Amino acid sequence: MTDKTSGLFHRDRSWHPAALTPPYKTSIKRSPAAAPISMPSTLSEDTGPVFTRDILGPQDADLIHNFASEGQSAIGPRIIVYGRVLDETGRGVPNALVEVWQANAGGRYRHKKESYLAPLDPNFGGCGRVITDAHGNYEFRTIQPGPYPWPNGPNDWRPAHIHFSIFGASFGQRLITQMYFEDDPMIWQCPIVGTIPSREAIETLVAALDMRRTVPMDARAYKFDIVLRGVRQTMFENRMEGL
Amino acid sequence: MVQKLENLKESPSQTAGPYVHIGLTPNFSGITGVYDADLGTKMLGDAPKGERITITGRVLDGTGTPLRDALLEIWQADANGIYPGQDGADADVYGWGRCPTDMDDGTFRFETIKPGAVQNRDGTPMAPHITFWIVARGINLGLHTRMYFADETEANAADPVLKRIEHQVRVPTLMGQPQGNGTYLFDIHLQGPDETIFFDI
């Protein structure tokens, strides 16, 4: 079995957060101190699990309703989040599993280790998932999460955010990140956002309000594109059906 | 001036945070009724070929304390060294597993089969190994490592990835240690004298 691709683009580690970022205190004892060992990707990283739509339930991409009682819905500003999963060459990544999780509109997570005084919403679970179409498009509905305080510094707050977990075609493309909201002043106060070295990189995680995708009298829309690592290939190795 | 390259930048990583379970293993975190089952809990069909194994361990921080909020994913080939999706792969080996560490004692556990040797890009064999990916609160970019099998002495000695590691003294951090009954122990140390080797792939 020969490897049809020529491996993954190397990762630009200066663009990503470093492992050790002391203002985010938990990183101090959880960050490897030795340099990671560089290696070109092999079949073990160039391949990866494939997820098909038969795993999806009818409401997996509707966080407003997927935990709610019959006839009920989650409380909060209703939004649509849409965008594309792309790779570094700009190609849409089809059949990418996108899993999301978030706090409710009051900034409270449904988790046994969470103790923020804001109340749970009985109709909001906080998880959803979707698989991209042939062009890499995805879309889900949810409520806009609230900001919340967290134990780090004496008065640190997370900006409103949605966590994203994305699978590409290769296990080496695996990525977890967070989506923030346009014009939120809390973005620039947050030590976790601040682990990202440049403002330019942070801005790629800020979703844009898109009034044209709004559903009038129902939900506003935010656009959030996600870029996974690219796959190196030559003209001659290019599979005609695309990668 | 020259023409512009049209490459995009990869989205920067952010930590999975303490509530990664809500999104990736909601049933484990007590959010039931949304997904039928958590993905990645079952790695085998009814009749996979190969030796059944259990991999267990903990993820330890720089103080030696196990992480009770980490999440691991693994990816592996079948007993013949063929990855799911490739021609001839064993349909009963799914290859991918996902496991949160226990909220009390920090252990993880995967039930799978031992993979075969996988070919390196140049056609030479790599020793049997399983790719690990670890995320957690405090980990800013998911960590990639590999578990090799300590009892594969000969294959490990010839493995092209292991051979090129400068500090050979650290290679044992990549070894799953046989405990008998097909169980391998693989503790992952994020820091300290036994810090596990992580790869920049």
Image (cartoon, rainbow, N blue to C red):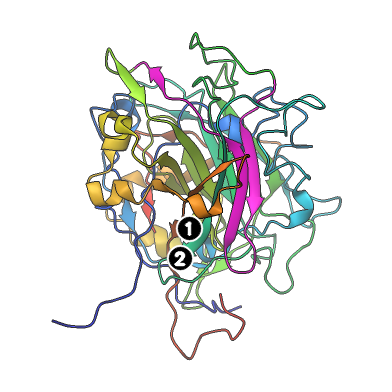
Q: Residue A241 appears in which quarter of the rendering? A: bottom right
The amino acid pointed to by label 1 is Gln
The amino acid pointed to by label 2 is Asp
Q: Residue B5 appears in which quarter of the rendering? A: bottom left
Q: Which residues are magenta?
A: A123-151
Task: Name, please, the residue furthest toward the left.
Answer: B1
Crowdedness of circle 1 by 10 Å Cα count: few (<14), some, many (20+)? many
Mark number displayed over residue A173:
1
Number of callouts in the render?
Answer: 2
Query: Where residue B8 sits: x, y (%)?
Result: 36, 66
Q: In the image shown, does B158 or B50 lie closer to the viewer?
A: B50
Can residue A3 be seen here? The reply is yes
Could you tell me which quadrant the C terminus of chain B lies in? bottom left
Q: Are marks 1 and 2 in contact (CB under 8 Å)?
A: yes
Q: In the image shown, does B171 or A169 lie closer to the viewer?
A: A169
Mark number displayed over residue A87:
2
Query: Where residue B194 sits: x, y (%)?
Result: 35, 34
User: CA gap, disc 1 to disc 2?
Assistant: 9 Å
Query: Where residue B87 sits: x, y (%)?
Result: 71, 74
**What residue is shown at x 53% (from left), y 24% (from top)?**
A105
| Element carrying mark 1 | helix
Mark 2 falls within which chain?
A
Q: Is residue A75 above or below residue A60?
A: above
| Element carrying mark 2 | strand
Task: Name, please, the residue furthest toward the top.
Answer: A117
